[in-house]
Image (tube, helix red, strand yellow):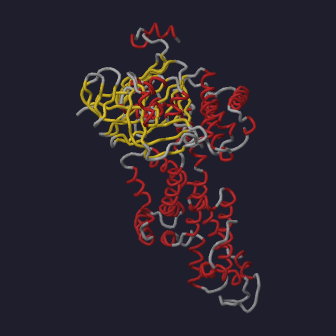
Amino acid sequence: MEADNTSVPMKILVALLFIFLLAPVILVVPLSFSGEQILSFPPESWSLRWYAALADNPKMISAFWTSLLLGAIVTAISLAVAIPAAYVIVRMRTLGSSFLYNLFTAPLLLPTIVLGLAILIVFASIGFLGTFPGLIIGHLVITLPYALRVLATTLGNLNLACEEAASTLGARPITVFRRVTLPMMAPGIVAATALCFLVSFDEVVITLFLTGPRLTTLPVELFHHVESRADPLVASVSVLLILLTLAVVMIVDRSVGLSKTFVK
Amino acid sequence: MMHQTILSGSPTVSDDRDVHLRLDGLTKTYGNSVAVSALDLSVPKGELVALLGPSGCGKTTTLRMVAGLIQPTGGRIVVGSNDITAMPTYRRDMGLVFQSYALFPHMTVAKNVAFGLEMRSVPKAEIERRVKEALAMVRLEALAERKPRELSGGQQQRVALARALVIRPSILLLDEPLSNLDAKLRDEMRNEIRDIQQSLGITAVFVTHDQVEALSMCDKVVVMRAGKLEQVGTPIDVYEHPATPFVASFVGRTNRLEGRARGDGTVDVGPMSVRVPGRPGGNVEIMVRPHRIRLLDADAAQGASGEGTNLLSGRLTRVTFVGDLLQYQVDVGGTEIVVEAASDHGRGIRSVGSPVALAWRVEDTMVFGRSA
């Protein structure tokens, strides 16, 4: 622990901010244990019935597996594309490097609704709507920029001299990359993995355009559920989602450290 | 090796069989700016040569071209009798020690040192033995299983040295290896690097901006300025007989006076007359090292005067105690001259404002021509 020299008003402000940010999350937990038929706070009776209902809801379960698989595949492809791309852009500086970087990270600046609409129009014409490959490509549009940005920053901050040292010691370029560059990028790769997975797993706006009656992701299924009914099932799903997110963040923290991964 | 060189029939190479590394008109330009300009240099086998100069003089660029990390725009790099100008870094067989150490942070000390041997597919048992030897050479056997970040700066630099030497490189390159260390450690490492280099008899090129490192460690000093050679010589040559005013002022401290030579062995500096060696003419620059000047009381000055001595009188304007040295600033007819004397328990400090005389031998006066 560092020396605590924060002033009292500052502490109060920070506490208020935390409450403001976390209130919805905290509220969801008691709601999920509600015994009521509809969402109301505070619940008048308590039960586990909505967790049981979740287990009996095949649509939610299948949507969950879809989301999980989708997140895993999208993350894997994002890394497979972004690692070499970051290397080319940062290490092999050419005239087009900064142009390419800006082009690849541009989707971050566009409103997702615009992206979603654009993807809808293209996919409708080639019959990709409501298909799993369609979902993968749609999600890649938004996860790739994150992956590229994180990895390019990581690579840019590495001591180039380490790679040069490896080559003077007799390592060919591909060996330098495999034995030195890649391991040194590990914190960035973990961060990019977590970020891509969470972005894909959470994504609603673009996915809304791409899912169909047979294929849907968990956030979209939740969204549709809330549209038609107002029962506490959403709360129990939300609690599970929060736990999953927390698990990912904790894995990151345990393996490389949160501040090292996301702050720098 | 030597036979090959003779048989190769290249006249320039066979002239000088002991030359290990040769740079022929080595040039590097970036757009319109010239980093290194047609550099010619020969490094004999087993010598430690310093590339000395201020930042931006092209010394590091030169070293990096030798290592293959920068592709030259012109000229050749020859090792033994092989032209390696176009050879990729990983085939050059050179050990490079970086200013930033550049240890692999994800590997232990032993793994760092073993890296170059693994790249050469050395058998495992031999790797283990040679890593041990190399770590013993830099006295770090005990830290073999540590990660670099758990080591002090000096230890990290010794690992880097072991890593570069364990592959038995043909040439050892050192890029300001001591600049990130504190003063005491720097002195130790200086001796350590020199001892290791001499015991292995390895040819080495040492880049530094620190004249003390260059003078104290190296067989030969190459003073560079703005991408060009200013002077190549032994440390004593470069210090005692600088070829240019730049070398005189960059290597060691010096007093600089401008004047007009009469052609009879004297130079007019303002109202004063200074005797110099030889009979130069025209506009000249005169330099005298501060420790070559003796500071005398004004009334004792007459006795010191003589044919071989320059004698000027002035007024003491400042005295600085620097521990082992006393630095005097003396105003001589409007020109400031610095004198250094060994300090003896702070005895003999004269008071500021007192009239003093400066005396130095004519042969200690360096003269350089000056345009306009």
- Give the side of residue B138 with respect to residue B49, left or right: right
Q: Residue B112 versus residue B101: which sits nearer the camera?
A: B101
Q: Residue B173 versus residue A220: which sits nearer the camera?
A: B173
Q: Residue B14 versus residue B88: which sits nearer the camera?
A: B14
The residue sitting at the bottom extreme is A44
Residue B250: percent from left, percent from top: 42, 35
Question: Residue A250 lies in what quarter of the image?
Answer: bottom right
- Give the side of residue B72 with respect to residue A259, left or right: left
Question: Residue B366 lies in what quarter of the image?
Answer: top left
Q: Quadrant of the N terminus of chain A?
A: bottom right
In the displayed structure, B64 sits above or below A191; it is above
In the displayed structure, A228 sits above or below A139; it is below
In the displayed structure, B359 sits above or below A140; it is above
Residue A179: percent from left, percent from top: 60, 40
The residue sitting at the front extreme is B299
Q: Residue B310 versus residue B251: which sits nearer the camera?
A: B310
Residue A247: percent from left, percent from top: 68, 65
Image point (58%, 42%), residue name? B346
Q: What is the count of numbered marks?
A: 0
* Whether residue A178 can be seen here: no
Residue B70: percent from left, percent from top: 43, 35
* Whether residue B319 can be seen here: yes
Image point (44%, 60%), residue name? A105
